[in-house]
Image (cartoon, rainbow, N blue to C red):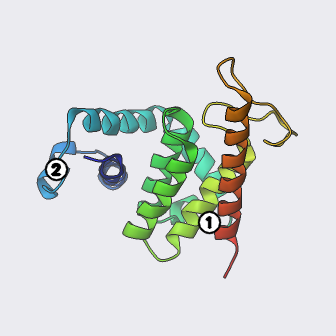
């Protein structure tokens, strides 16, 4: 199974948990037999569910903070499941690039929710990313500094890797801003 499909299953389980109070992995697979879950995919899915369980208040707090103009209890449950999934990846899965988490969340919203949900999800996640000034998947820019101003490195990063990380963030920020603008 591709990671994209594993995200879809994880989103559906988060949605199921929100509606019924529990997520039943086996019943979901019985209802949707087209998913072929491998052990690695199952570990990823269960890891995300456990991460959400452990950090639900923090994750929901971020959603509340960045869903400007929306009361939390009025957010569509599908959109909420998608946002929770994306924030779990962004906050607690450094092995997944931030831009991938955002792009996949927007795609899930377009597929499973309303016409405007992709923009809403992108806006919430973009606001979160900008507020945290996430410049790469592993490091945050110090307060008051932009990604292009600071050198965000580890001992292993080279100058070219720094430049690539900064360029990727700038491109990602521009994409988020473009998608947030009303048409």
Mark 1 highlights which residue? 70
Label 2 and label 1: CA atoms lie apart by 33 Å
Q: Position of residue 116 (x, y in %)?
A: 53, 75
The quarter in which the C terminus is drawn is: bottom right
| Observer able to see residue 134 | no
Q: Is residue 53 left or right of residue 1?
A: right
Crowd around label 2: few <14 · some 14–19 · many ≥20 (10 Å): some
Placement of 32 over or under 41, stated as above or below: below
Mark 2 highlights which residue? 29
At 54% from the left and 53% from the top, the residue drawn is: 102
Q: Secondary structure at mark 2?
A: helix
Q: Position of residue 169 (x, y in %)?
A: 69, 47
Q: Position of residue 5 (x, y in %)?
A: 30, 52
Q: Position of residue 97 (x, y in %)?
A: 54, 41
In the image shown, does 149 or 164 lie closer to the viewer? 164
Question: Considering only order in the chain, which callout, 1 or 2, is on the residue closer to the N terminus?
Answer: 2
Q: Secondary structure at mark 1?
A: loop
């Amino acid at each position: 199974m591709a990671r994209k499909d594993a995200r879809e299953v994880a989103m559906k389980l988060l949605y199921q948990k929100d509606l019924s109070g529990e997520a039943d992995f086996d019943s979901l697979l019985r209802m949707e037999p087209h998913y072929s879950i491998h052990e690695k995919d199952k570990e990823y899915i269960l890891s995300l569910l456990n991460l959400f369980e452990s950090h639900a208040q923090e994750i929901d707090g971020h959603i509340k903070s960045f869903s400007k103009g929306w009361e939390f209890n009025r957010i569509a449950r599908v959109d909420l499941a998608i946002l929770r999934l994306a924030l779990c990846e962004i906050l607690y899965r450094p092995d997944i690039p931030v831009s991938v988490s955002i792009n996949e969340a927007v795609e899930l919203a377009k597929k499973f929710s309303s016409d405007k949900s992709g923009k809403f999800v992108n806006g919430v996640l973009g606001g979160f990313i900008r507020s945290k000034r996430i410049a790469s998947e592993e490091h945050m820019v110090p307060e008051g500094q932009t990604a292009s101003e600071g050198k965000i490195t580890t001992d292993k990063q080279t100058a070219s890797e720094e430049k690539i990380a900064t360029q990727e963030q700038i491109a990602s920020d521009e994409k988020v801003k473009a998608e947030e603008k009303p048409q």
